[in-house]
Amino acid sequence: MEEKKKLDISQLIGFALIGAVLVWYTMTQKDKEPVAENTKTEIVQSNEPENSTSDAVVTDSLLQAAAVQKYGTFAYAVASGTEENGTTTLENDVLKLVIANKGGQIIEAQLKNYEDYQKAPLYLIKDNNSNFNIQFGTQDNKLINTKDLIFAPTTSKNGKNQVASFKLKVSNSQYLEYRYELKPNDYMLDFSVRSVGLENVINSNNKINLEWDMTANRQEKSIKYENQMTALHYEKEDGKYDDLSVGSEDDEIESDVDWIAYKQHFFSTILLSNTPFEKAELTSESLVKDVLVDTLATKSFSTVAPLKLTNGALSYNMNFYIGPNIHKNLASYNKGIENVMNLGWGIFGWINRNAFIPIFHFLSSFIGNYGIVIILMTLVVRLLMSPLVYKSYVSSAKMKVLKPEMDAINAKFPGKENQMKRQSEIMALQRKSGVNMMAGCIPALLQMPVFFALFRFFPSEIDLRQQPFLWADDLSSYDSVFEWSTHIPILSSFYGNHFSLFPVLASIAIFFYMRMNQGQQMSMQQPAQEGMPDMQKMMKMMMYFSPIMMLFFFNNYASGLSLYYFVSNLLTLTIMYVIKTYVIDEEKILAKIHENRKKPKKTSKFKQRLDEAMKQAQEQQARQKGKK
């Protein structure tokens, strides 16, 4: 009985444990049900990004539709996945170019060896100051501007040359390509435009225009002077070179244009084409109205040149020159682009190319101070010109010796009615004495080309740029010892808001030169004749007027030129003093004149005709006097 009792207790314990397990299981399962519901809710919420993606797809579809509506077949380029703000850099030792995917055009061009007037890196292209675009129509009646579309870039090497290809795609096998190739240590960039597979895309009935605009940003100390030297140059048909006015605004339409240059004083951005542009619409506008206000840019340039299709395709091989105006370097390309440097026309340019540029570069090759180079160059030029100064002075001395006899002739034949007779007698005296009245003028005239050549040389010589000498910090610009900001009517417009010392020294030197020269000229000048201007008074006025005019004009000009004229006039004064004091002997000249009078004179046919003409004029004058 006791054994049964034990079994019953064990069963009870077992049943109790089983019941407890069942209760625990039931309770745990109920606790998990809400968790299952929450999980279901989270899954529903996780579907929301899928809805957002769907919205984005709808948005992209709308943008694609808008692109197709606007660009037609070129909508492919919009949806190509190329980064819109992406850029590609081409760089050598002298030039750094940044080319944008949008428009496939150069958006930065830095000349690595130069700085602007603020000593900052010099950029000819930056901050959207340049725009290159090709505009054309398509077969689906869309107007395409390449500047608005995205080009797909690739880079490669061609030997040591860097190559960047930018393709505006209709498909992978149909595109418009800009190809840039940059050589080592060169400012000249190969540039080509070609279309591939677009014969049925481009509408040949519409004009295809190349449009190139640029604003010339300020690079130099004097924006007024820089603006005067900034211009649009071009080569037109038959190898002729021309430029637009440096004034307020100018435009021209030219045919068969080989190259177009946007010249900024010492630097140029030049577009050259192996296939001449059949027509080019060129425009230039000055942006400097007030030098105290308009201080950021000098001029805006614009070119519109229609392009032509060859067998339904565009194919143009071009070049971009983006660099300094160095005559030797520009001439080495054999493209005529050295003509952007305004060295003067005719004999003036010839003197600069064959004399002054070689002399200057020879001296600067072993002398580092360009102020000293200018002084030595001045010395060389004046020594070469000294024979002309000598001949002119000898002629003046001869006329001075003859002056008493000429005064006697004037006294013998006074009055306006004897003018022809008086002139005839004076010419006979000069001829008999072996004195040529033109001998003093010809040497002076021969020196004029040198003056005008130098006037063009100094503004064009880039080696003078930012080179200091004494108080001048830039020999290519004005030297300033004192400046002011207050605008003074008339004075500020013509003279400027600064005081330059080199022009003052040059003006003083030219005053004393003219004074010495005038003293020599007046000593042989004939008395004023009735009805004729008084040359002595005019020369005296010029002696004071010329230095003042030079002072105002050269205050904003290159200090190197003022330094040259200052040294040149000092040297001329010295040479004239030496000739007058130690070389010219008036007694010997007079003896020579008397000796010449004893020699028989041959009369040339020209002189015979001249004498006959004067004789007829005298007879006619006498008849008119008799009638009265």
Image (cartoon, rainbow, N blue to C red):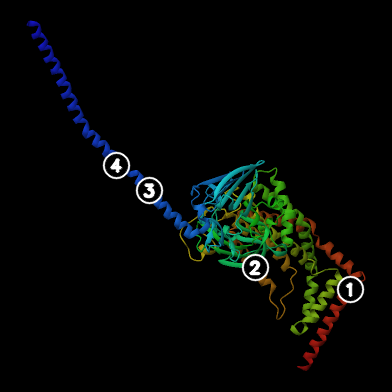
Contact, CB < 8 Å: mark 4 with mark 1? no
Alpha carbons under labels 1 and 2: distance apart: 37 Å
N-terminal-most mark, 3 or 4: 4
The amino acid type, in three-letter code, at marker 2 is Met
Earlier-in-chain disc, 4 versus 1: 4
Query: Circle 3 sits on which residue?
Result: 54
Which secondary structure, mark 3?
helix
Q: Nearer the viewer, residue 316 or 244?
A: 316
Q: Are marks 2 and 4 in contact (CB under 8 Å)?
A: no
Q: Is residue 292 visible?
A: no
Which residue lies most toward the right here? 600
Q: Is residue 323 left or right of residue 497?
A: right
The CA span between labels 4 and 1 is 118 Å
Rounded to the nearest angstrom, the CA distance separating label 3 from label 2 is: 88 Å
Please give left or right for residue 458 compared with residue 172 in the image: right
Residue 589 appears in view? yes
Lower sequence index among marks 2 and 4: 4
Graded by Cα atoms within 10 Å as few (under 14), some (14 to 19) or many (20 or more), the crowding at tag 3 reads few
Query: Residue type at mark 3?
Result: Ser
Tags 1 and 3 touching, CB below 8 Å: no
Q: Are marks 3 and 4 in contact (CB under 8 Å)?
A: no
Q: Nearer the viewer, residue 288 or 258?
A: 258
- Give how far apart the Cα atoms at labels 1 and 3 are: 106 Å
Q: Are marks 3 and 2 in contact (CB under 8 Å)?
A: no
Mark in front: 3 vs 2: 3
Q: Which residue is mark 2?
A: 542
Residue ID for mark 1: 604
Q: Secondary structure at mark 2?
A: helix
Q: Secondary structure at mark 1?
A: loop
SS of the residue under disc 4: helix
Picture coordinates of residue 284, whole percent (x, y)? 57, 64
